[in-house]
Image (tube, grey):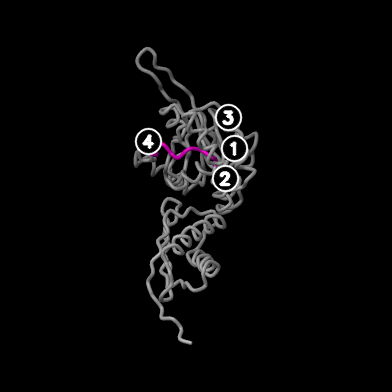
Amino acid sequence: MRSLFRNLGWIFKGVKVYALIGKSGTGKSFRARLVADKYGIPLIVDDGLLIKGEKILAGESAKKEATYLGAVKVALFQKESHRRAVIQALRKEEFNKILILATSKKMADKIARTLDLPPVHKYITIEEVATPEEIEIARHYRRTQGKHVIPVPSLEVKRTYPQILADSLRLFIKRGFGFFKKEQVVEKAVVRPTFAQKGTVTISESALTELILHCLSEYDPDLRLLRAQITTEGGAYHITIFLSVPFGKELASPLHELHRYIITNLERYTGIIVEELHMVVDKITKPVEG
């Protein structure tokens, strides 16, 4: 209830949430400042950090985490102390727009809810602000060198995260027209995350299936998992599970609750984003005769 009132508070103040959506490694952080300038957005939420201009106001960088899953949890503000620190910093700021960087719409929505912000007002895809060639260059850079961008100067990153700082990048941006045209220098920090240095951690389909089986057995032992289909896109998971249900069992309300139960637990304990979970009743079993 308290979260709802805080959300309404931002709405009454006219705060609008924007989201820049793109798969990992497509150049979101590289173009975050350009998007923010275009829409007049003073604050950016990127990988666990709250950024204003060239300053990190609050948060923890997902780039310093030892594992990929740890980085995802930081980016989603799953640690309460981390979440509270960023929310407190937001309350001290006077702003009417904020930009969230995310790999999917669901991830952006989740971050907005976690930080007690209003629902996303506008989604902007990376394809709207970068050409296919630029996106492919960013992907190649990520694959071959494992480097990421934080949209603040390297000195700002060096103060807190010297161990991951790799380089700096300067962009020369021309603004205005004719006689009034000016050149602005924008610096971004280039970092090599700890998890990129040590390799990545992924969750296999069999491990996720085991977690789903565990959720089913905890929620309702009468339900049986026949098989699961799991795919990923843009860092988000799309899951379809096929169930066996005893004849005569009431389904409507229990399955709706089970749907939410499985998503909540998968996201809580693994740090993944479940974009879709489809549940298919594939078999009705006969009751056991006494």
Relative image position of residue 249 (x, y in whole percent)? 43, 72
- CA gap, disc 1 to disc 3? 14 Å
Above or below 182: residue 45: below
Neighbour tally class for label 1: few under 14, some 14-19, many 20 plus, Cα within 10 Å: many
The numbered mark, 1 or 3, whose residue comes first in the sequence reads: 3
Magenta stretch: give its range: 115-124
Q: Nearer the viewer, mark 2 or mark 4?
A: 2
3 or 2: tag closer to the N-terminus? 3
**Residue in the foreground of this view, choosing between 187 and 216:** 216
Q: Tell me which amino acid carries mark 2.
A: Phe
Residue under label 4, please give it.
129
Q: Which residue extends farthest top?
A: 179
Q: Secondary structure at mark 3?
A: strand
Q: CA distance from mark 1 to mark 4?
A: 27 Å
How far, Cα to Cα, is label 3 from label 4?
A: 24 Å
Callout 4: SS:
helix
Instruction: Out of 59 and 179, give the one closest to the viewer.
Output: 59
Residue under circle 3? Answer: 55
Query: Secondary structure beneath disc 2?
Result: loop
- Which circle's residue, 2 or 1, is located before the other in the chain? 2
Look at 45% across and 33% down and name the residue there: 16
Q: CA distance from mark 2 to mark 1?
A: 9 Å
Which residue is at the front of the view, 211 or 175?
211
| Residue 94 location (% of width, % of height) | 54, 26
Task: Give the CA distance from mark 3 to mark 2.
Answer: 19 Å
Distance from Cα at disc 2 to Cα at disc 4: 26 Å
- Residue 92, x across and y down, in percent: 60, 29
Percent x, y of residue 187 = 52, 29
**Nearer to us: label 1 or label 3:** 1
Label 3, residues with CA under 10 Å away: few <14, some 14-19, many ≥20: some
Q: Which residue is mark 2?
A: 77
Front-most of residues 284 and 242:
284
